Image (cartoon, helix red, strand yellow):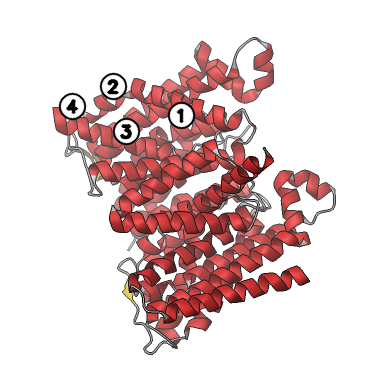
């Protein structure tokens, strides 16, 4: 209990720091870029709950993220719902999609699961493209509500995303240290053996896919207000899928700190490269770093540190 | 008012496209179906082939299909190198499932971004003397633009079928897919044979890419549209069955074409993925599964 208390305190401290940062006047672009990095902390952590703990590689990150974003667009369009409602609704809808994907794991394991998630992303994109109410293929612009609680709207969103990042890391931390995390690790190593030992594999997988999906949706829900123009190609960008798996792979997939480390390092590097060089080249760097880490340092940065300490 | 003419045209167009889809999917059938290596970078190799055909056609005026055929040795070597890296980093350590998948995904992404850095993101198309011609059979038009790739695709299918069934190396590849341990006991090295098979699979992508860019305009991110198609065809055809690949490709081609004709082209992409999800969930062994 004490350790949980400390973890929550640290989380609260991070949010307070983010609010304090939002109060200080620095270059507004810092918040704009910082939002993306924090968004990737949520996405990478969400991916790792299924990919790192349970060993199911999900290529469908764009599907869950965009579903969160489009749920928000729908609610803004229909009832002008406030931001907290958008975030909760995005989480619920994407969580339900995650639950569905979880039932798919009954028939599909390993590679087939991954291909199915990729397929899911394209099917969903096709449906959104054909749905005129949320903008169809042309996309639609979203007007930010006036008068954020403090600062400009971007600094406000930055703080919100910081809170969501802390929330998702806490969720991952709790899962890792509970019976759920141990059960997931067992089924990652050998699903049949775990099932034989009485580990409720299906229930665990459903928990993992639902939570992972819900966190993706939560990350996507503020997206319409952040970009103010939502269209399918940017909401369903393959970049999300690559980043979502590159970040935990670089940091290390076995612990909650891995995705956070990966997201902060790779996310910041990408933002810098986008400004200084070009966005295409920054994506190229992500790809190369991903392949290099997978080939040369399969345990990620955490594994490298551990190996250095072991000697 | 239901138009039978429209239906007949859609069926024929779908059949022709299906022959082309077979050409695109043969590599996956070989690499994923037989060797069990989840090479999701295959469509990126096809797009690379397409851009090579575009580049050499623009520079020297060469026929795209001849370029595709001429570059097969180069793609074979590329494939062999990629397999060796894959083998050394993952297969030998027994980590192929999760990290191998990520490796190929990264490869796909790198190739896609490299192509858009080199050639830009404009749509590219290769025009040839025969692309604009067509013949008419009592109201059903057959465009050469689709007919030629279909014929080449069927020829490739036949060639691969004969290679796997009749030649020494082809039969060795089938043997690897059946029982690697037994093959090792016979004194053969499974890694060498898998290298050959992977190389052949990537070489097929060169020719498939050349066909692709003479059918329709290509951008670097076109590869994403083909991931689902390739794997849907391979799974539906029964994982490594070459004849099954052709049949599944034609089924998909006709289904997509009907969808595009009667519901609008924006829905046709969902067909392949819907079919894939359906095949995976209901009958993972495919139509001609072992």
Q: Chain of mark 1?
A: B
Disc 1 versus disc 3: nearer the observer? 1
Of helix, strand and loop, which one carries label 3?
A: helix
Lower sequence index among marks 2 and 3: 3
Mark 4–mark 1 distance (CA, rounded to whole Å): 28 Å
- Residue B218 visible in the picture: no
Q: In front: B223, or B285?
A: B223
Indicate the chain on which mark 2 is placed. B
The answer to whether B95 appears left or right of B226 in the picture is: right
Quadrant in which the C terminus of chain A is drawn = top right
Q: Which tag, 1 or 2, sits closer to the chain's start? A: 2
Q: Is residue B264 left or right of residue A290?
A: left
- Can you tell which mark lies on residue B70? 2
Q: Place residue B3 in its image quadrant.
A: bottom left
Tag 1–tag 2 contact (CB < 8 Å)? no
Q: Nearer the viewer, mark 4 or mark 1?
A: 1
* Marks 2, 3 in one chain: yes
Q: Are the residues under marks 4 and 1 on the same chain? A: yes
Instruction: Say which residue label 3 marks.
Output: B49
Q: Which residue is mark 4?
A: B62
Q: CA distance from mark 1 to mark 2?
A: 20 Å
Cα distance between the residues tagged 4 and 3:
14 Å
Q: Residue at x 38, y 66 (%)?
A: A33
């Amino acid at each position: 209990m004490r350790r949980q208390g400390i973890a929550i305190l640290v989380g609260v401290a991070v949010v307070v720091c983010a609010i304090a940062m939002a109060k200080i006047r620095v270059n507004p672009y810092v918040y704009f870029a910082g939002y993306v990095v924090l968004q990737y902390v949520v996405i990478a952590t969400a991916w790792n709950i299924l990919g790192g703990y349970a060993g199911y590689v999900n290529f469908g990150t764009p599907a869950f993220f965009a579903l969160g974003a489009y749920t928000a667009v729908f609610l803004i369009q229909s009832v002008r719902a406030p931001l907290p409602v958008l975030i909760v609704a995005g989480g619920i809808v994407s969580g339900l999609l995650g639950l569905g994907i979880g039932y798919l794991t009954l028939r599909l394991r390993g590679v087939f699961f991954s291909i199915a998630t990729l397929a899911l992303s394209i099917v969903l994109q096709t449906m959104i493209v054909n749905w005129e109410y949320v903008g169809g293929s042309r996309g639609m612009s979203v007007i930010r509500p006036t008068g954020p609680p403090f600062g400009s709207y971007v600094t406000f969103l930055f703080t919100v995303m910081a809170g969501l990042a802390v929330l998702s890391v806490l969720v991952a931390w709790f899962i890792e240290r509970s019976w759920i995390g141990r059960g997931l690790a067992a089924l990652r190593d050998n699903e049949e053996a775990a099932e034989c030992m009485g580990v409720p594999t299906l229930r665990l997988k459903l928990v993992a896919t639902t939570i992972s999906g819900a966190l993706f949706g939560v990350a996507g829900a503020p997206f319409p207000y952040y970009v103010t123009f939502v269209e399918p190609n940017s909401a369903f960008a393959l970049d999300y899928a690559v980043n979502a798996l590159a970040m935990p792979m670089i940091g290390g997939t076995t612990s909650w700190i891995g995705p956070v480390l990966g997201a902060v390092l790779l996310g910041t590097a990408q933002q810098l490269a986008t400004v200084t060089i070009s966005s295409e080249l920054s994506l190229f760097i992500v790809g190369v770093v991903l392949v290099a880490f997978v080939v040369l340092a399969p345990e990620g940065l955490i594994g490298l540190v551990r190996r250095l300490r072991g000697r | 008012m239901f138009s039978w003419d429209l239906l007949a045209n859609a069926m024929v167009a779908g059949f022709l496209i299906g022959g082309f889809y077979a050409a695109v999917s043969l590599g996956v059938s070989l690499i994923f179906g037989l060797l069990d290596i989840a090479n999701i970078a295959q469509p990126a190799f096809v797009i690379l082939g397409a851009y090579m055909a575009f580049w050499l056609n623009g520079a020297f005026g060469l026929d795209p299909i001849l370029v595709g055929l001429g570059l097969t040795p180069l793609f074979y070597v590329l494939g062999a190198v990629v397999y060796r890296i894959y083998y050394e980093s993952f297969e030998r350590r027994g980590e192929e499932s999760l990290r191998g998948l990520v490796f190929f995904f990264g490869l796909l992404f790198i190739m896609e971004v490299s192509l858009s850095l080199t050639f830009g993101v404009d749509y590219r198309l290769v025009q040839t003397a025969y692309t604009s011609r067509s013949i008419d059979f009592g109201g059903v038009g057959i465009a050469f633009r689709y007919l030629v790739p279909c014929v080449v695709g069927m020829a490739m299918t036949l060639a691969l079928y004969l290679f796997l069934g009749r030649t020494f190396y082809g039969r060795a590849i089938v043997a690897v897919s059946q029982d690697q341990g037994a093959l090792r006991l016979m004194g053969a090295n499974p890694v060498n044979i898998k290298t050959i098979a992977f190389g052949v699979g990537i070489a097929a992508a060169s020719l498939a890419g050349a066909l692709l860019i003479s059918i329709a305009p290509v951008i670097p991110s076109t590869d994403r549209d083909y991931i689902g198609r390739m794997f849907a065809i391979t799974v539906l055809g029964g994982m490594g069955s070459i004849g099954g690949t052709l049949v599944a490709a034609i089924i998909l081609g006709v289904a997509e074409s009907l969808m595009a004709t009667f519901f609008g082209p924006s829905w046709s992409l969902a067909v392949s993925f819907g079919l894939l999800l359906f095949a995976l969930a209901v009958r993972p062994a495919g139509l001609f599964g072992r």
